[in-house]
Amino acid sequence: MIPDPSSVSNARSALSRLQSALGRAGDLLIRQSIRLAPTEAQRTLGVTLLVGAACGLLAVTFHGAILAVERALISPAQAARGPWWFVLTLLCPTLGGLLAGLALTYAFPAARGSGIPQVKTAYAVQTERIRLRDGAAKFGITAFQLGAGAALGREGPTVHMCAALSCAVGRWFALSPRSVRRLLPVGAAAGVAAAFNAPIAAVTFTVEEIVEGLDQTVLSGVVVAAALAAVIEHTLLGSHPIFTLNHPVSLQHASALPSYALLGVLAGFTSLAFNRLLLGLRGAFRRHRGLPDWAKPAVGGLVTGACAAGGLALVHSGGVAGGGYLQLGEALNGSLPLLTLLVLGLLKFAATLFSYASGGAGGIFAPSLFIGAMLGGSLGWLEHLLLGHQQMGQFALVGMGAVFAGVVRAPITSVLIIFEMTGGYGLVLPLMIANTTAYLIAKRADPSGLYNALLEQDGVHLPHGSVAAHQLEKLKVEPAMTTQVSTLAAALSAREAFAAIAHQPFATYPVVDEQGRCLGLLDRARLRRVLAEDGASRKVSELVHLKEYVYPHDSLVRAVVRMNAMGTRQLPVVNVGTSELRGLLTMSDIFRAQAEAAAGTPEAEPSRPHHVLEDQVR
C-alpha cells in the first residue's frame, strides 16, 4: 500500500512542530540554568547533584526490572515440576541470549558487554559517544538477559547507563565538552554506589578504574554524586547492607592467617585463569564464522542453562543462572556444604565465561564475587576439617574480595566494597593479606588487566596511566592529525552557524576566516547558550573560546602538554606564520600514533577522514 501523501506531510509537520517545541523547551532550560547559576562551575555542580539523584533512581529501577523478569522467567523455570524444570532451565537462558543477540547485532551494538570498557574509552580518549539511546537499550537488553538466567551481573551495565545519562544531562544543560567529560566518572560512581550500596567503594573504583589516577578536578563531583545516589538507594530499598551476616565478622584465630594467605594465592591464580580463559573464548567466538553473530549469545545461554541444570541436579541449588545473590549470602553465612560450594563455583565459572564471551550484555562484578565466595568457603571447610576452626563464612567473605581484586584489578575497592556490602569490618588484616596477594599475582602475570585487555582485543589501545613523554618525543603532529575537518566560517552569525551544524554529529568546530586562518575552536554547547540568551546575531568570530594551537612539525609530547594546560582534548594544527588551518589533532590521534609506534606499524598518512575520528564529536 502506498502511503497517502497528505498523511506523510502531516506526520512531517507534526515531527517538525515537536522538534521546535523541544528546542524552545531546551532554550528555556538553558536560560533558567544560566540565570540560577551564572558560571560554568555552578551549573556543573547543579548538574552533578541532579545526576547523582537520577542515577540512584535509575539503578534502583534497573534492579527492580531484573527481579521482575527473574520472577517471570528463570525462577519458575527452575521450580517447574517433573522433567519440565530441566527443559525450561535449558531453554530460558538460550531464549534470553537469542533475543539479546538479535537486538545487539541489528539495533544496539554499543550496548554489548559490561559497559565499563566503553566508559573508560570515552573518558580517556573520547573516541566514541556514550549515547542515551545506548544506555536505554542497555537497560532493556540486560534486564531481559539477566532475568532469563545469564550468569552475569548488573553492576557494569549500571555504570554504563549512568554514564550515558550523565552525559545526556550535561548536554541538555549545554555544558562545555570539558564539563560533560567530567560528568562521565560522576555517573559511573553514582551507578556503583547505588548498585552495591557502597558509596566509598564507588569513589575508589572510579579513581582506580575509570579515571586511573587521582584527578582533583573530578574527585569532588564523584564524591557528591556517589553519596547522593547511595542516599536515594537507602531511601527506596533501606539502609541495610546487601548481605546480612548471622555471625560476628572477626579474626577468631591468628593461626588462620597462613590459610588466608593461601586463599590469596588461590584467588590470584583463579582470577588469572578467569581473565585469560574469558579473553581466549571471546576471541574464539569472534573468529568463528560458521555461526551468525546474533546466534552466538544463544550458545552462551545454552551452556549457562546446562550449567544451571547441572547445579540443580548435583547439589539441588540454584545460583549459577542469574546473579546468585541468595546462594552468595548463604556462603557468607557458612551454611553451604563443601560439595555445594565446589560445584556452584566451578559451574558459575564456566557459565560466566560463555555468557560474556559469546557477546551478551552484562557485567562480571557479581560473578567474580560469587566465584570468590565459593572458593573461599571451600578453603574454609578444608581448614575446618584440618584445624577445627568454624570460619567458613569468614573465608567466603575474604575470598569474595580476593578474586574481585584479581579480576577487576582494583585492590583498594576490593577491600572497601566487602566492608560496605556486608557491614563487617573485623577482617581487615585477612582481607588485606588475601586481596594484596591475589592482586600482585594477577598483576605480575598480566599487567594490563581485564578491561584494558578487552579493549585491546577490540583494537582500542589505551595508555596505562598518563601518556609517557618519552614515547611521544620522536612522534610529530603532522602524521597523526586529521585533515578532513568540519569548520565554521568566522563571518556567520550564531543562528546561521547553529543551522549549519544542526545535522552534523560533531560538538567542536575550528573557526576559520576568509583567508583560511584558524581563529580557534567553538563548541555546540556555547552556541546553544548564546542562542538561549538572545544572542542569535552575534558573529562566530566573537564566540571563539580556545585560541591555542600546534604546528605540524611539533612533537606530540608538546601537544599533550598544551592540551593538559588548556584542559582540552583537541587542538587545531596551523601553518607557521600564516595560521592557515591544516588539520585537527585529538587525544585519540595521539594514542593511536603511540600504539602504532609501539607495535612497529607505519604511521598513517595525514589524510585520515574525520568520520573515523570521533574526538571532534565531544
Image (cartoon, grey):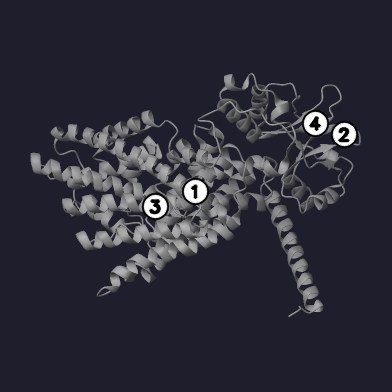
Residue drawn at 54 percent across, 49 percent down: 163
At label 4, the amino acid type is Arg
In front of the other: 471 or 354 = 354
Give the foreground label among 1 and 4: 1
Give the CA distance from mark 2 to mark 4: 9 Å
In the rendered structure, the answer to whether residue 153 lies left or right of residue 520 reads left
Q: From where the camera sits, is residue 162 visible?
A: yes
The local crowd at label 4, few if under 14, some if 14 to 19, many if 20 or more residues have their Cα within 10 Å, is many
Which one is nearer the viewer's eye here, 112 or 278? 278
**Which of 423/95 is in front?**
95
Q: Are the residues tagged 2 and 4 within 8 Å (C-beta)?
A: no
Q: Amino acid at mark 1?
A: Arg
* Label whose residue precedes the other's in the sequence (1 or 3): 1
Q: Earlier in the sequence, mark 1 or mark 2?
A: 1
Residue depicted at x 64% and y 33%: 587
Which of labels 3 and 2 is toward the front?
A: 3
Q: Residue under circle 3? A: 354
- Name the N-terminal-most of marks 1 and 4: 1
